Amino acid sequence: MLARRAHELANAGDFRLACHLIEMAQIAEPSSAEIRGIRAEIYKARVKSETSLMATGIYRAAHLDSTAEKDD
């Protein structure tokens, strides 16, 4: 599964590729709670790894989007 591979990459510190993969997985299955959960974890970890204020804001927004209740 693409989302699991993204999670593995994030755990290895490759957030750039992990974010690309999780976004593709989210587009493919927008109603998947599992993918939203993995996406939230990846972006939460990426926020912690960034030093740029602008980047942390962008990744925090992606994290919050993933944790918001969806009306699918």
Image: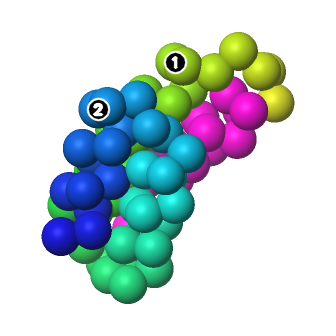
The single residue placed furthest to the right in the displayed view is 54
Cα distance in 3D space between marks 2 and 1: 13 Å
Badge 1 element: helix
Determine which of the numbered discs, if any, sits on residue 25 in the image.
none
Q: Is residue 32 above or below residue 72?
A: above
Whole-percent x, y for residue 44 in the image: 44, 31
Majority secondary structure of magenta residues: helix
Q: Is residue 2 above or below residue 10?
A: below
Q: In the rendered image, is residue 69 in sight?
A: no
Whole-percent x, y for residue 27 in the image: 45, 79
Check the picture and name the quadrant holding the N terminus.
bottom left
Magenta stretch?
A: 55-71
Q: Nearer the viewer, mark 2 or mark 1?
A: 2
Tell me the quarter of the picture where residue 31 sits. Answer: bottom left
Whole-percent x, y for residue 66 in the image: 43, 53
Please give the residue where the numbered disc 1 appears in the rendered image. 48
Q: Is residue 64 above or below residue 26?
A: above
Residue kind at label 1, given as amino acid type: Lys
Residue at screen point 52% across, 60% down: 20
Q: Are marks 2 and 1 in contact (CB under 8 Å)?
A: no
First in residue order: circle 2 vs circle 1: 2
- Going by the image, does 22 lie left or right of 29? right
Residue kind at label 2, given as amino acid type: Asn
User: Along the line of sight, which residue is nearer the eye, 34 or 21?
Assistant: 21
Check the picture and name the quadrant holding the C terminus.
bottom left
Residue at screen point 33% across, 53% down: 6
Q: In the rendered image, is residue 1 in sight?
A: yes
Residue at screen point 59% across, 35% down: 60
Residue at screen point 33% across, 43% down: 9
Tell me the quarter of the picture where residue 13 sits. Answer: top left
Please give the residue where the numbered disc 2 appears in the rendered image. 11
